[in-house]
Image (tube, grey):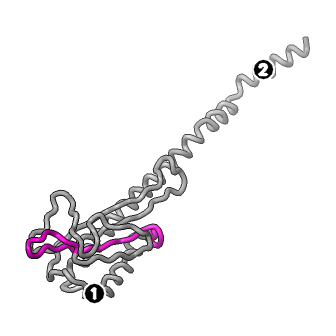
Amino acid sequence: MKFATHIRRRWRRFCDDRQAVVLAEMAMAMPVVIVLALGGFEIARFTLVQQKLDRLSVTVADMVAQAETMSAGQLDQIFAATGPILAPFTMSSDGVVIVSSVSATGGTGARVAWQRSGGGTLVESSPIGAASQPATLPAGFVVRDGENAIIAETYYDFVPMFIPDLVPPRRLYHRAMFRPRFGALTALN
């Protein structure tokens, strides 16, 4: 009888104790909270790198288009400026910037006058085309006879830090197009 009373009292105390409920709820909720926090971090990181790559393409194309003439050395200096623009992300082996000058002369259609890449060591070819080859321009963008365009393309391999299933690794691509302001820029000096 004393044993039964003891068991009943222990059982009642166990049922009245709410600390165990809080621990159980915390144990069930914590994985969800962690996944949400890390997922939010990855999505914010992905959005930030997309914005920075877009800004990088626009900045490089704009800087080249502002020049009267362009040399390989000047282009290398512009490529050197890509690091601070993309910070805290690094181009190094994860990215590359490709700058192309597209012009049309003599009614032959748009051709890639010259093309250079830099800012990183990622190996990628431009969908615009190769130097001295016909240019494949985006829909709605036309380079008429006697015109010239500067196209900057940025490639970057994004790899998530924590949750690769939420935002899988992928190659990002951004492009910006400008018409030269002061010179034709059909040749690299």
Q: Quadrant of the C terminus?
A: bottom left
Residue labelled with disc 1: 71
Q: Nearer the viewer, residue 135 or 89?
A: 135
- Range covered by the magenta-colored residues: 88-112
Residue in the picture at 13% in, 64% down = 142
Amino acid under disc 1: Ser
**One can see residue 86 in this view:** yes
In this image, 42 relative to 31: left or right?
Answer: left
Residue in the picture at 39% in, 56% down = 47
Give yes or no for residue 106 being in the magenta stretch. yes
Q: Secondary structure beneath disc 1?
A: loop
- The spot of residue 69 in percent (x, y) is 21, 86
- The spot of residue 107 in percent (x, y) is 8, 71
Numbered-mark total: 2
Q: Quadrant of the N terminus?
A: top right
Q: Residues within 10 Å of mark 1 (few under 14, many from 20)?
A: few
Q: Nearer the viewer, residue 152 or 103?
A: 103
Q: Nearer the viewer, residue 180 or 161?
A: 180
Give yes or no for residue 5 being in the magenta stretch. no
Q: Distance from label 1 to label 2 (Cα)?
A: 85 Å
Residue in the picture at 64% in, 37% down = 27
Q: Nearer the viewer, residue 84 or 7?
A: 84
Residue in the picture at 44% in, 58% down = 45
Q: Residues within 10 Å of mark 2 (few under 14, many from 20)?
A: few
- The spot of residue 51 in percent (x, y) is 34, 61
Amino acid under disc 2: Trp
Q: Secondary structure beneath disc 2?
A: helix
Residue labelled with disc 2: 11
Residue sticking out furthest to the right = 2
Q: Quadrant of residue 133?
A: bottom left
In this image, 95 relative to 13: left or right?
Answer: left
